């Protein structure tokens, strides 16, 4: 049994859901998202609630997945999603320019990272990051599509992963990094 799949999704005011074949279209104040519906799963509107139903008990994993994707689309068009990333390291920087971010990450050249449609970025230097040595900038990424936002954040993280000794690189805010001790002199 899928516990998540059985839960009904209450539609907030200003959100409309249209079921078109194997696709769910969600419209809200922030935009429109389309979510695929897996085979064997169907959605039904009951007043202000959206319910996911499955044809057989073999599809319990897809049942929960389909309901979670629909819920993420509804949250995205009403509130949106944000992810924060820290740029840490002496001389490291991130500069947001319209639809791209220019990184300086210790390589011999700057890295231009194009932002896909629907993802916005903002760079700011916070003064409360006292626990992180060599802190430079915090990037705040925002989008209505949770999957696209996570993909962009993962690709940025790959540009320069935090190293094991000083933690220099692009890191997710709130994810603790266990640093190795340096060499000991004899």
Image (spheres, rainbow, N blue to C red):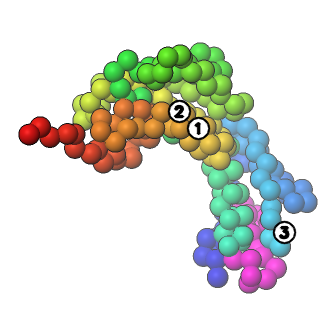
For the record, the magenta segment spans 43-60
Is label 1 in a helix, a strand or a loop? helix
Give the side of residue 166 with respect to residue 169, left or right: left
Residue at position x 72%, y 64% in the image: 66
- In the rendered image, residue 48, in percent from the top left (x then y), is placed at 72, 61
Visible residue check, residue 94:
no
Residue at position x 53%, y 32% in the image: 159
Give the side of residue 169 with respect to residue 36, left or right: left
Q: Which residue lies furthest to the left in this view?
A: 186
Mark 1 crowd level (few <14, some 14–19, many ≥20, 10 Å Cα): few
Looking at the image, tell me whether mark 3 or mark 2 is earlier in sequence order. 3
**Residue 50 falls inside the magenta stretch:** yes
**Residue at the disc numbered 3:** 39
**Residue at the disc numbered 1:** 155
Q: Do the residues labelled 3 and 2 touch (CB within 8 Å)?
A: no
Q: Are marks 2 and 1 in contact (CB under 8 Å)?
A: yes
Between marks 2 and 1 in the image, the one whose residue lies nearer the viewer: 2
Q: Quadrant of residue 120?
A: top right
**Residue at the disc numbered 2:** 159
Mark 2 crowd level (few <14, some 14–19, many ≥20, 10 Å Cα): some
Looking at the image, tell me whether mark 3 or mark 1 is earlier in sequence order. 3
Calculate the distance from the C-alpha at mark 3 to the C-alpha at mark 2.
37 Å
**Residue 97 falls inside the magenta stretch:** no
Q: Quadrant of residue 181?
A: top left
Between marks 3 and 1 in the image, the one whose residue lies nearer the viewer: 1
Calculate the distance from the C-alpha at mark 2 to the C-alpha at mark 1.
7 Å
């Amino acid at each position: 049994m899928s516990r998540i799949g059985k839960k009904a999704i209450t539609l907030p005011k200003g959100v409309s859901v249209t079921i078109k074949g194997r696709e769910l279209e969600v419209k809200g104040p922030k935009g429109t998202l389309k979510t695929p519906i897996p085979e064997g799963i169907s959605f039904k509107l009951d007043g202000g609630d959206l319910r996911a139903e499955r044809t057989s008990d073999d599809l319990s994993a897809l049942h929960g997945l389909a309901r979670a994707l629909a819920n993420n689309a509804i949250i995205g068009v009403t509130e949106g999603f944000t992810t924060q990333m820290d740029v840490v390291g002496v001389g490291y920087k991130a500069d947001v320019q319209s639809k791209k971010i220019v990184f300086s990450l210790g390589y011999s050249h700057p890295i231009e990272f194009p932002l896909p449609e629907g993802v916005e970025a903002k760079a700011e230097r916070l003064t409360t990051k006292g626990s992180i040595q060599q802190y430079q900038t915090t990037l705040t990424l925002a989008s209505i599509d949770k999957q696209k936002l996570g993909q962009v954040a993962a690709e940025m993280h790959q540009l320069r992963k935090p190293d094991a000794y000083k933690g220099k690189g692009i890191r997710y805010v709130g994810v603790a990094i266990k640093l190795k001790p340096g060499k000991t002199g004899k």
